[in-house]
Amino acid sequence: MGEEKTYTERFKLSGEGVLSKVKEVMREGNARRLIIRNEDERVLVEIPLTVGAVGVLLAPVAAALGAIAALVTHCTIEVERVGEKPAEAEKAEGDQPAS
């Protein structure tokens, strides 16, 4: 049996956009883990997700994220997803200059 393929996406958001983005990611259903980092790239919260627990976890996660959103002005959401990376995500990464 082969390993599951995963890929990571990063979204930079202002505090008020965090909760809506997390809800969107959870609804999509292919997220394995969410990591929210502050402007200094420090991990504020890491949320492992499983398919069956998403509905159960949404309320307490939403409350915690609301508190985080009130405290930060900008943050990064890192989403680990299961499956093949979409072509548009690869193209977007390829367009960025190398550092």
Image (cartoon, grey):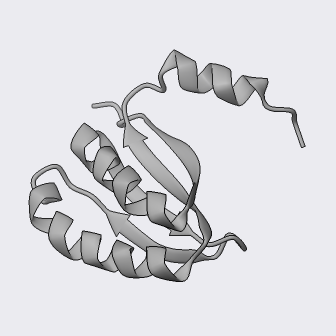
The residue positioned 72% from the left and 74% from the top of the image is 40
Q: Is residue 7 visible?
A: yes
Residue 85, how many percent across, how many down?
48, 26
Q: Is residue 29 visible?
A: no
The residue positioned 26% from the left and 71% from the top of the image is 61
On screen, residue 23 versus residue 58, left or right, reads: right
Q: Quadrant of residue 41?
A: bottom right
Q: Decide: is 41 above or below 14.
A: below
On screen, residue 7 versus residue 21, left or right, reads: right
On screen, residue 19 versus residue 77, left or right, reads: left
Q: Decide: is 81 above or below 42.
A: above
Residue 50, how many percent across, how many down?
21, 55
Q: Observer-nearest residue: 25 or 50?
A: 25
Q: Residue furthest right?
A: 99
Q: Decide: is 16 above or below 2.
A: below
The residue positioned 16% from the left and 49% from the top of the image is 51
Q: Quadrant of the N terminus?
A: top left
The residue positioned 44% from the left and 48% from the top of the image is 80
Q: Quadrant of the C terminus?
A: top right
Q: Quadrant of residue 76?
A: bottom right
Q: Quadrant of residue 59?
A: bottom left
Residue 14, how many percent across, how many down?
57, 61
Q: Decide: is 6 above or below 92.
A: below
Q: Observer-nearest residue: 47 or 19?
A: 19
